[in-house]
Image (cartoon, rainbow, N blue to C red):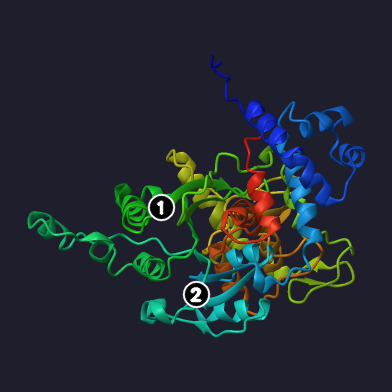
Amino acid sequence: MCHNVKKSPQNISRFMQQVSGVSDFARLRERAGLSVERLADQIGFSVRTVYRWENGETLPRKVAVRFLENLVREKHEEIPKDTMFRFIDLFAGIGGLRRAFESLGGKCVFTSEWNRYAQLTYMANYDCDHEITGDITQVPADRIPPHDLLLAGFPCQPFSIAGVSKKNALGQPHGFRCEAQGTLFFDVARIIETHRPSAFLLENVKNLTRHDGGRTFDIIQRTLAEELGYQVHCKLLDSRPWVPQRRERIFIVGFRESNGFTFDDLYLPDPAGGPRLKMVLHPENGNEIPENPYTTGPEARVSGKYTLSRHMWKYLRSYAAKHRAAGNGFGFGLVGPEDVSRTLSARYHKDGSEILVSRGRRNPRRLTPRECSRLMGFDELDGKQFTIPVSDTQAYIQFGNAVVVPCARAVAEHMVPWLGIDGDFHSLNRQMRLPLVG
């Protein structure tokens, strides 16, 4: 007689433990080199709770799994980076996506970026053993090195409908080679078609989903899923959990093989407990070394050139007042150390209106490029600064067009275990993609 057993996550976990003799969570803890007692102390849970996770009585909390994964990753940093996975960086900008995946053991084998100022910043910050290609539209796909992962922050463009209706009337197939021809997404698609990488990550502005009445996003999804045959997943992420900035971007992930990847279990810190601007603003009290031309003097005070002129400040206030009277929402964004900023845009160099730092009775000021680097997560937590070799105007444009690095890294950490790379570390991470409680 057969009995139906409810296939809950707990039952699945217990069954797998019975088969293997030890739980996946216990194996991960052992690889991290922690005792049950030590782990419980470091993550703030009781010893009994950790034992219940190991025995399969309850599912482990995501925060505990992430904590152990990070420890395991640190213990395996001696693995040569070029043995992990290879990726290409298209529409690279100043390398925000590269920064995220390189930190997880990836090796960049090809870079494309057309803007010469962005190229300067890119070369100043990354150890490139290859030349940066300018116009990707002029590069034959078969001249791009083999790679496991394609990264692209491609520009958003409308697709042409020329020829599509005629081909439909004649019953002829058209596909992305007709619909996407002349757009930069076409170049992403043709490279994917030629190389068939294990995965790709495309990043774009939130408006991509509404662009051209939704038609742009529809063609992109159909091209990737139906014509190129990838398992496609999309996630809109706000940067607030990682940096003190409201910045929404869409991440499109695709895998060549069906592997169980989902964005549903992506760990997202609580944005309400996220950082505030005091973490990125110059303290101006002597606690940091002066950095010319951004800060000067023994107290490293922000240079006066970033303070708005009387004329500009008067203009912004008048302009905001006019729009308020008309019922519009436009206005400058005045912030302090405990605030979260608006989105940093590429036009920030014009008047800085979206993020102005309050200075009491004095006129407010713009962020310095160094503060923009911190706001976008390019400066490392260990104090290593991102090199800014260009003018303030170019720096503002570059950071305004960039991806928030910690946000991209969260996506990268979620993706890498599913890249289909051989090795115990990635195999173990894939095993840990059992259902977890939040």
Q: Residue at x 71, y 71 (%)?
A: 386
Label of residue 396 in the image: none
Q: Residues within 10 Å of mark 1 (few under 14, many from 20)?
A: many
Q: Quadrant of residue 268?
A: top right
Q: Is residue 383 above or below residue 229?
A: below
Q: Is residue 149 left or right of residue 20?
A: left
Q: Is residue 349 left or right of residue 275?
A: left
Q: Quadrant of residue 128?
A: bottom right
Q: Is residue 215 left or right of residue 24?
A: left
x then y, percent, for residue 251: 50, 52
x then y, percent, for residue 27: 78, 45
Q: Which badge, 2 or 1, comes first in the chain's sequence? A: 2
Q: Residue at x 77, y 39 (%)?
A: 22
| Disc 2: which residue | 146
Q: Residue at x 31, y 57 (%)?
A: 227
| Circle 2: element type | loop
Q: Residues within 10 Å of mark 2 (few under 14, many from 20)?
A: some
Cα distance between the residues tagged 2 and 1 = 29 Å
| Disc 1: which residue | 208
x then y, percent, for residue 188: 40, 67
Q: Is residue 274 above or below residue 373?
A: above
